[in-house]
Amino acid sequence: MNIKGIPGAPGIGIGTASVLNKDLNIPRFAFKNAEEELNRLSDALEESKKQVTLLKERALKNSHKDVADIMEAHLMMLDDPEFLGKVKQSIQEEKLNAEFAVWSVAQEYIETFEKMTDEYIKARAADLKDVAERIIRNLTGTLVDLSDLPEGTILVARDLAPSDTAQIDRDHVVGLVTDEGGPTSHVAIMARSFQIPAVVGTKTATQNIKNGDKLVVDGSEGIVEISPEKHVLEAYEKKLSGWKHEQEELSELITVPAITKDGTKVKLEANIGRPEDVETALKFGAEGVGLFRTEFLFMDRSSLPTEDEQFEAYRKALEGMKGKTVTIRTLDVGGDKDLPYLGLERENNPFLGWRAIRYCLDRKDVFKTQLRAILRASAYGNAAIMFPMISSVEEVIEAKKVLKEAQEELKKENVPFDEHISVGIMVEIPSAAVAADLLAPEVDFFSIGTNDLTQYTLAVDRDNQKVRDYYNPLHPGVLRLIKRVIEVGESTGKEVAMCGELAGDDKATEILLGLGLRVFSMTSSSIPRVKKVVISSQKEQSQKVAKEAARL
Amino acid sequence: MGTEHVETEVTLTNPTGLHARPASLLVQTAAKFKSNITLEKDGRTASAKSIMGVLSLGADQGSRIKITVEGEDAKAAMQALLDLVKDNFGEK
């Protein structure tokens, strides 16, 4: 049988299913020998410590200091004499089995922590939950260690958290399948950057797939074949070798310049989410970073990142790109993200709510800290600043006012920065596209964010299964908005880039070229495929294709 | 060697109280000694060698903490802990 989902990351993976069961079962049973229970506990603790130490070392090696700090806190909990004392006492005196004892003692602490007003301690409740779950899973033998999966594994899960995906060994995992998620969900983005074929949003994968099932993941079509028949498997094996061949062909394109047949120069840039990603960007021949998302600095933590922490991250990306442009987008979060320390609340309509630049203009302290960090880093490379979610010119003026304040502060402190840093905006709200001429005098560049622009223009939530078929970035309405921005850019001499998903979709490249787009920013691994279209295109033909698509 | 018993009350002056790094630092310091070290705040006690116990106290800046140390190296342990508090756990 096969199941259908949403294409998450292209490619074909053939391998063996490892189903990640995130439901935690805590068995409760009577035992005769307390000594034996205590031994089971101590074995599970040793095992847990080994695992966490490994994760910590790995995080340090990849310079994810934030992750390493969390792992260190987990290690302290695994060694905590008071906690372990209470667990042992429950085993000996209350005759609770090890799993149940760990759970009930942890629960007491969790309740205490959750009652505290202090955000830091509240966040420790989540850490303790994590630690307790690890001990229990080691006791019951239900722990799936994502960092140590055998070669040829296809990971199947309801959903994967960032920390799950981060552990994955890219050489051993050949495919990902999830019940939840859409094309822009975290799993899909990570899978594309790791180049692991993925099918997301299958709804039923964890019900239909058993551990050890032979699977084929077709991440380009969004299909998962479960225990396929011989002829199906052979067809996919053939397809896989074709895909590998194509990849090799594309890899030869990496050093080829992106120039059309009739000599138009096109700039292909990378979207990145962490400073380490610049390595991959350069590997695929990116000519710059068109979008550096800065949200990673704010995720999975309980307090604001400091100016220095941010500065280090930006500097690392700038130095890594060796003088090529790095366009840093200021904080883009809203009520859809659970970051209580930012003071964000759940909203009925987070995508129409208090988010991105709107939040930053109300929380100028947070905003200015980030701008100061970006400015300080600008002394170490070629930085540009980009404001997200701009709907009208007043927001740009106000944002630039804060930027100016930051610049003056730094000048007074004698801190070096690039005084001519480029300042631009994301065009993702239809009003910004329609009224681009009003915005042009205030900006150095535009960057079109097609995901949100499409969502807002067509009034459709692409993660909502019932309406996602309405989501179409090639809708004539959307294409005409894109055309409008490009025309304003041409007449005012302001660069127009595109950093949405559409920029990396080689089926749209010709249309976008025809509309006049010259700067494309995308997931690094998409660059060669888009380049292949660029070098074989010609102005007349692409303009014709664009006209038809926009029905002009 | 005899068992010593010392106790002192201190006020936390560092900005974050016994959270995050200060709490870890205190636990790591306490763990170096053989003595039993207990902290008490508002009637709640915790072992200074337990990160979870220390966090459960919810001690913030300005909190009064009673430190009780019992054991063969009690005096040295107390001195080390007082130094940490006096030094604001290395915070500004």
Image: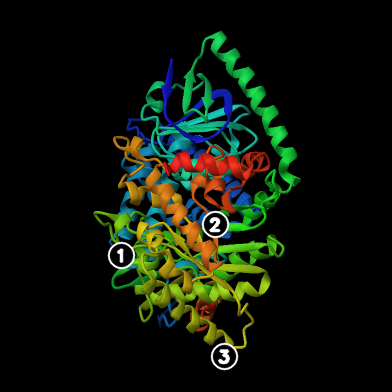
Q: Which residue is mark 1?
A: A116
The residue under label 3 is which amino acid type? Answer: Lys
At x 43%, y 79%, the residue is B15
Quadrant of the rendering where the C terminus of chain A is positioned: top left
Tag of residue A497: 2
Q: Residues within 10 Å of mark 1 (few under 14, many from 20)?
A: some
Which residue does the image show at 45% across and 48% down from the upper left?
A131
Which residue does the image show at 37% across and 24% down from the upper left?
A207
Q: A140 or B47: nearer the eye? A: A140
Between the C-alphas of marks 1 and 2, the distance is 47 Å
Between residue A489 and residue A56, name the one nearer to us. A489
In front here: A206 or B63?
Answer: A206
- The first of marks 1 and 2 along the sequence is 1
Using the image, determine if residue A326 lies above or below residue A253.
Answer: below
Q: Position of residue A364 (x, y in %)?
A: 40, 76
| Amino acid bearing label 2 | Ala
Compared to A342, does A284 lie above or below? above
Q: Nearer the viewer, mark 1 or mark 2?
A: 2
Q: Which residue position holds label 3?
A: A412
Q: Position of residue A143 (x, y in %)?
A: 48, 35
